[in-house]
Image: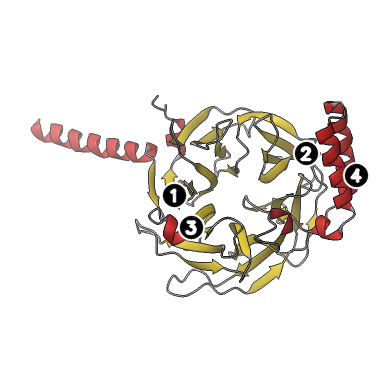
């Protein structure tokens, strides 16, 4: 009898520990908060490498537009519990490199997208110029990453004049020709006459995705015209085409997932007074988009990212507060491709001061979820959790 009780007790402990591990949230700083050593630390991106290690990157410098801003990275090797010392990933001398996003394609190549502020520090995001690098030699942690391709990505927006004019007409009618709206539209029409304004100011944030067609879709937005667009390459970066912009003003930093039926769903950070994440859909693999509408997700105009999981569930990571400070970071999950969102858990939440934003989220091959985000602009925090953790009831 005693032997039976002991056996049962150990089996119970094993089950309890396993269950607990499945619903726990684990986190650590990639490096200790260090404003003096790293400066303004922001906008991380995260990927899993083919060998099972994680690679994270971010930008840092005196400020987000200062000429010393560069892109740093660190690794979490498979089986290790702590991140490696950080190392340089990209740096354009005397200019600011911003908002990196990492991506591993079906050929197991590592991509780094980012943009350089050509007018920094006096001029900021309206001088952004898109760039990317591709590497096939990046997994050996003892050696620097070797870039096989280093290229610029000049943007050629489709129907930009028509889109801006349509949005201006809508905004003027809705606002009854408010003088501020009139001024904004006049400025936009002037900018349309400049080839530099049409080609610069396009910025990245959320990771690209590989479509069911095999093409790679890179979400982007214009800091000059307040609209979004998608860059699409069907041949691994040799050629690019650009979507028609979705009809929505003030949208930024789109993030995209593909439904089972091939419909693409884009969510947008929004700078309007609605303080809501906005949404659009495409039924032709990203070439054209439906008019942009509000969702029920609150948002203070901060970075978001959406991800389709291996089981078909969808997760969205975002700041679920209306105004700054961005002191609440949540992850929501849908089991019906975004029609409803049954579960929400908070990764960070405080009633006082705190800033936890610009998240990046991935699912590794073992099914676990991993995220990185800016922590008070002083470091990058890394967390790991499971779908079961999202589904468990949150303590008040």
Q: Which of marks 2 and 4 is nearer the N terminus?
A: 4
Q: Farthest top residue?
A: 396
Q: In this view, does 167 lie to the left or right of 214?
A: right
Question: Residue at left 23%, top 37%?
Answer: 13
Q: Residues within 10 Å of mark 2 (few under 14, many from 20)?
A: many
> Disc 3 marks which residue?
39
Residue 270 placement, left or right of 45: right
Q: Residue 220 carries which label?
A: none
* Mark toward the viewer: 4 or 3: 3
Residue 105 can be seen, yes or no:
no
* Quarter assignment of residue 71: bottom right
Residue 169 appears at what percent x and percent y?
89, 34
Residue 14: x and y in percent read: 26, 39
Image x and y of residue 128, in percent:
71, 58
Helix, strand or loop at disc 2? loop
**Residue on which disc 1 sits:** 381
Where residue 99 sits in the image (x, y, percent)?
61, 55
Q: Which of marks 1 and 3 is in front?
A: 3
Q: Mark 2 points at which residue?
A: 249
Q: Distance between the residues labelled 1 and 2?
A: 32 Å
Question: Which of the image's four quarters has the N terminus?
Answer: top left
Residue 162: give its label. Answer: 4
Task: Verify CB contact (< 8 Å) between mark 2 and mark 3.
Answer: no
Please say if the residues under marks 1 and 3 sit with CB atoms less than 8 Å apart: no
Marked residue nearer the N-terminal end (2 or 3) = 3
């Amino acid at each position: 009898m005693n032997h039976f009780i002991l056996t049962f007790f150990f089996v119970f402990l094993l089950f309890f520990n396993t269950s607990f591990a499945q619903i726990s949230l684990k986190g650590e700083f990639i490096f200790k908060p260090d404003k003096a050593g790293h400066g303004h630390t922001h906008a991380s991106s995260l990927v899993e490498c083919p060998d099972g290690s994680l690679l994270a990157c971010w930008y840092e410098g005196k400020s987000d537009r200062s000429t010393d801003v560069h892109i740093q990275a660190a690794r979490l090797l498979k089986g290790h519990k702590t991140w490696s010392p950080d190392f340089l990933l990209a740096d354009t001398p005397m200019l600011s490199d911003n908002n990196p996003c990492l991506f591993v394609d079906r050929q197991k190549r590592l991509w780094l997208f980012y943009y350089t502020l050509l007018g920094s520090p006096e001029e900021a995001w309206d001088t952004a110029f898109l760039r990317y690098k591709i590497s096939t030699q990046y997994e050996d942690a003892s050696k620097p990453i070797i870039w096989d391709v280093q290229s610029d990505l000049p943007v050629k927006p489709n129907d930009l004049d028509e889109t801006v004019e349509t949005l201006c007409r809508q905004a003027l009618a809705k606002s009854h020709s408010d003088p501020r709206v009139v001024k904004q539209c006049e400025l936009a029409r002037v900018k349309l006459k400049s080839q530099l304004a049409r080609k610069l100011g396009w910025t990245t944030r959320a990771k690209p995705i590989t479509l069911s067609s095999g093409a790679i879709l890179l979400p982007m937005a214009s800091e000059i015209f307040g609209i979004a667009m998608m860059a699409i390459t069907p041949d691994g970066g040799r050629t690019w085409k650009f979507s028609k912009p979705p009809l929505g003003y003030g949208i930024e930093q789109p993030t995209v997932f593909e439904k089972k039926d091939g419909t693409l769903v884009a969510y947008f950070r929004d700078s309007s007074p609605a303080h809501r994440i906005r949404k659009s859909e495409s039924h032709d693999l990203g070439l054209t988009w439906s008019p942009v509408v509000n969702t029920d997700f609150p948002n203070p105009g901060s970075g978001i990212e959406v991800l389709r999981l291996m089981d078909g569930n969808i997760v969205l990571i975002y700041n679920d507060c209306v105004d700054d400070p961005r002191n609440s970071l949540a992850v929501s999950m849908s089991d019906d491709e975004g029609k409803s969102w049954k579960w929400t858990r908070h990764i960070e939440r405080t009633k006082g001061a705190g800033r936890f934003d610009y998240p990046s989220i991935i699912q590794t091959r073992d099914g676990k979820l991993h995220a990185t985000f800016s922590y008070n602009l002083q470091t990058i925090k890394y967390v790991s959790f499971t779908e079961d953790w999202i589904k468990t009831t949150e303590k008040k």
